[in-house]
Image (cartoon, rainbow, N blue to C red):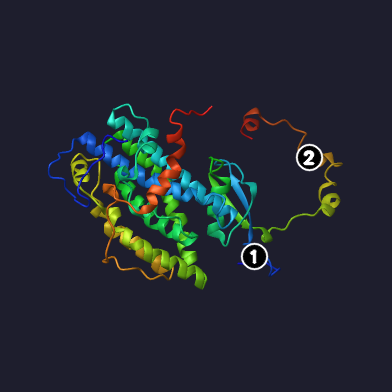
Amino acid sequence: MSNNEDSNDTQWPLWEVFTQPRDGKPHEHAGSLHAPDAEMALQNARDVYARRNEGVSIWVVPSNQITASTPEDMGPFFDPANDKPYRHPKFYSVPRAVKKRS
Amino acid sequence: MSPKSKTDIPGAEHSATQTLTEKEAFFEYLIRLADDRLILGHRLSEWCGHGPILEEDIALANVALDDIGHSAALYEYAAEVEGEGRHRDDIVYFRDDVDYRNVKMVELPKGDFGFTIARQLLFSAFSYFLYERLKDAEDEQFSGMIDKHLKEIKYHLRHSREWTLRLGDGTEESHDRIQAAFNELWTYTDALFYMDEVDELLIEKGIAVDLNDFKDEWKQLVTDVLEEATLEVPDFDQFMQSGGRKGLHTEHLGHLLAEMQHLRRSYPDATWE
């Protein structure tokens, strides 16, 4: 697989690495790296981002497969929620046992 | 200098005049395992800052650290078994090449990336089968150590296998280079399976294992990887090098030790502040 539009680019494709700190926790973005293919990306991720017990699971995703919001999206994407308090689940109390778990 | 310098006839698999005690045999056995890993780790460490790409630089340094860590634990236990108050550093820094017991394969210069990967595959596959069996050894401290190191060895095997596949089945140049590396290394493979009275005595005690038990499995694994990598499997029945386990080495080991031991021998009482 190749994501090089620029044929002068001799780098291997870029991958984003997500590690799961422990069971039940969501995977978090750890960083990125270069690798020729998925298996090598996984191994490199283990060597670069999971050498010191940082996780129990790793995902690698080709960087060019990620669609991200842009700074221009700031307003339309994220603003409207802030002035509509009824959208926020703040009007009932959460049982303590539930709170502890999160 | 080690008090245990032997002047055996090179290549003699049995020194008739000598009967080993279990303690001597176990010490020798641990030193053989440790020397292999220290010297290989040292060779791998030479890639630090010279890897083909940042990620691989880190990967090779990781494997080097694993190997040196495995050797440190083995030396420490060897010193304990010996019971003469030596520190593991004494064993490492104050022995000459004739006292080193590693196989010749691990002391060869690092060569190109293909050579390093080919050697790592051959050695890690051997280590994997050996440790799989040694982890049941009837010596709790030894088997515990082996079990812990086995996890890392599995990763070394995976790493070198994946690279062998990619270099072998890669470009014409990568294929030719790693093929040449396997051809050159092949003559050093049989020495991995060397056994003598040390092994015999410890097999009886339930500590060591008979290396012949997994020789075919090792050949099969290596053959499968090479074939999948579109590489020629060299002939297993060719002339084979020997000698490392008896302190006979290539010229390369002396240079490596000179570099490794120089500081410690110049300042024997130096300590980390």
Q: CA distance from mark 2 to mark 1?
A: 48 Å
- Judge from the rendering whether residue B89 lies leftward or rightward of residue A61; answer left or right: left
Say whether marks 2 and 1 touch (CB < 8 Å).
no
> Element at badge 1?
loop
The residue that label 2 is drawn on is A88
The residue at 49%/65% (across/down) is B167
> Element at badge 2?
loop
- Residue B154 place in picture, x, y as percent: 41, 50
The residue at 86%/50% (across/down) is A75
Is B158 above or below relative to B237?
above
Q: Amino acid at mark 2?
A: His
Asked whether residue B135 appears in the rendered view, the answer is: no
- Quadrant where the N terminus of chain B sits is top left
Q: In which image quadrant can residue A7 be found?
A: bottom right
Q: Amino acid at mark 1?
A: Thr
- Mark nearest the camera among 2 and 1 is 1
Asked whether residue B77 appears in the rendered view, the answer is: yes
The residue that label 1 is drawn on is A10
The residue at 81%/47% (across/down) is A78
- Residue B227 place in picture, x, y as percent: 39, 69
The crowding category of the residue bearing disc 2, from other C-alpha atoms within 10 Å (few below 14, some 14 to 19, many at least 20), is few
